[in-house]
Image: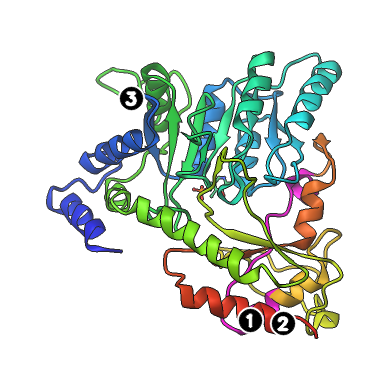
Amino acid sequence: MSGNEMKFVQEAFDTNWVVPLGPNVNGFEKDLEDFVGEDKRVVALSSGTAAVHLGLLACGVGPGDEVLVQSFTFCASTHPITYLGATPVMVDSEPDTWNMDPDLLEKAILDRMEKTGKKPKAIVPVALYGMPYKADRIMAIADKYGIPVVEDAAEGFGSKYKGRVLGTFGRFGVLSFNGNKMITTSGGGALICPDAELWQKIMWYATQARESYPYYQHEAVGYNYRLSNVCAGIGRGQMTVVEDHLAHHKHVQALYEELLAGVPGITVHSQPGGGDYDSNYWLCTITLDPSLRIKGQENAYKTIVKGAVGGAAGVIHMASSAVTDCQPNDNVEALRVLMDQAGIEARPVWKPMHKQPVYKGVPAYVNGVSEAIFKIGMCLPAGPYVSDEDVRYIVETIKGAIEA
Ligand SMILES: *Cc1c(COP(=O)(O)O)cnc(C)c1O
């Protein structure tokens, strides 16, 4: 944290606003509104997951409904669908952006209407690792069938498609300020809303849905989802350096692209050319050719991993086996282990939701793209503290791990 964050946090204590409302929350929302533009209104919330939840709720998603969601994502895109008693319908990705395939989306809409006699209630595309989805095509399909879009831009804060900030195309846009995201409030999120009316609705649900009586009168079920004024102080400080963060992530990506360009069997995942895409490169990702030999890969998956990916806080279940029926290739796991031994935290890419045991049996429209990338993909460090020297060290470690 810099002095800017400390100043706003100190102010929260000095003025006794240590509650989930106050000047920092209002100021942070204003900063976010200025940043995303397009005359949007923003509600600051306790997490990005809460933002997905309330966005779907305000689209009318309820028990028995279906929601079309990008399968290649973190579980926070899909779990809130089940909180509402609805069913996620998984839609696979396209190879260039790794995001929701618009053709498959339309096929899924038509097939769901034929099979269930009902339209899906919402569409959730995801800006994977910051990469923009084809927002214009997804919006055109959504509009054609009259289905609202909740953009999951949690990883894509500041990414643009055709010059417009992600999260401002759909009815709602989700942002996350978790510790590892583009900017952080330690934990937090926000929902971008199209107008004052929906902004008010979201605010109402986020503050326990209260009626204006001198006592607590409830006519609907609400949530305690508002962001704390202390955390919003961190957010206000972070907003003063957001452009630096964005520039840094793009710089790190460019350096990986340059230094890994000549390495056979390694491909850096980059945005499509032509100028439509402006990814924030929240995380830099590579893919490993299945034929690439990594030192020690014959020993991959021989032991049960004890920790959880992501250094998860709280309780994690012990893995019951060293392998599952869908996992990264041996060379990817071997590279992850070698990097870990060199003090570098590399991770597999998200495991597609249609391959997750918890979503076994839900409808899925699959073309094999996300599963194939899951087997060959890897995320490389890209945060604000990753220096040029670190990137060189990481690239040298990768080169040294390849069998001659
Ligand atoms: C981080 C993230 C979220 C929101 O997560 P929180 O940790 O609850 O803020 C939602 N979707 C995706 C794709 C994410 O990566």
Q: Could you say which quadrant of the image residue 217 lies in?
A: top left
Local crowd at mark 3 within 10 Å, few (<14), some, or many (≥20)? few
Q: Whole-Å distance between the Cαs marked 3 and 1?
A: 60 Å
Element assignment for label 1: helix
Element assignment for label 2: helix
Element assignment for label 3: loop
Q: Whole-Å distance between the Cαs marked 1 and 2?
A: 6 Å
Image quadrant containing the C terminus: bottom right
Residue 298 place in picture, x, y as percent: 86, 81
Q: Residue beneath label 2, please?
A: 401
Q: Residue beneath label 1, please?
A: 397
Residue 400 place in picture, x, y as percent: 69, 84
Q: Residue at x 68, y 35 (%)?
A: 69
Magenta span of residues: 336-359
Q: Whole-Å distance between the Cαs marked 2 and 3?
A: 63 Å
What amino acid is labelled 3 in the image?
A: Tyr
